[in-house]
Amino acid sequence: MSELVRLDVSDRVATITLDSQHNRNALSVQLLTELHESLDRSEETAALAIVLRHEGPAFCAGADLKEQSDQPTDPTRFVRALERLMDADCPTIAAVDGAVRAGGIGLMASCDLAVVNTATTFALTEVRLGVAPAMPSKRGAWVWSPT
């Protein structure tokens, strides 16, 4: 199984790269596991900043729906990743140069700062499935958007 998340630490800046282009960086169990591992290693290096970026045309497509169709998944791992980005001891920065969908918006919004290409598009695609979109706020509360 190939690596879906890479970490590079240079000059005490930890750059975490989502690289699961085959599914538009969807939030699979493997991607979330590797994201947590990268956050762990960033903390161990006492990074002064964490930059979350991506490879491919999408920053993040949200939940991996193909994986979820096989078995229901526990959202705890995703929610914990959002909390860790919000509560990190150093600034977190989302570097976005591609489509952001569903839970990817939450991932981006959990960072202290988002630097976004003006051509980037956003969508809460879960409403097509009859699911109300949920976005985390900086205070850790969940804000439900009406559909």
Image: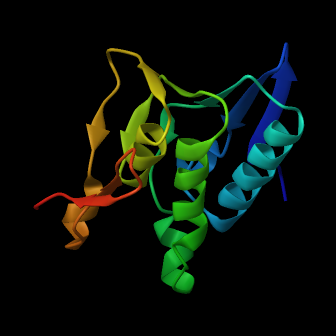
Outermost left residue: 146
Answer above or below: position of 4 versus 30: above
Could you tell me which residue is drawn at 60 percent across and 55 percent down? 81
Can residue 124 be seen here? The reply is: yes
Name the residue furthest right.
Answer: 45
Q: Position of residue 146 (x, y in %)?
A: 10, 61
Instruction: Please tell me which residue is depicted at 55% across the width and 79% down the height of the picture.
Output: 74
Q: Eyeballing the image, is 132 above or below 50?
A: below
Name the quadrant of the C terminus: bottom left
- Can residue 26 be spotted in the picture? no
Image quadrant where residue 70 sits: bottom right
Tell me residue 36's x, y (percent): 73, 54
Which quarter of the picture shows residue 71?
Answer: bottom right
Left or right: 43 in relation to 53: right
Q: Nearer the viewer, residue 2 or 40?
A: 40
Quarter of the picture holding the N terminus: bottom right
**Residue placed at 66% from the left, 30% from the top?**
90
Question: Which residue is at the far bottom?
Answer: 71
Q: Residue at image x 45%, y 54%?
A: 62
Colour theme:
rainbow
Where residue 5 sits, quadrant-wise, is top right
- In the image, taking residue 78 as reference, residue 7 lies left or right, namely right
* Percent position of residue 59, x then y: 50, 36
Foreground residue, 33 or 83? 83
* Total marks placed: 0
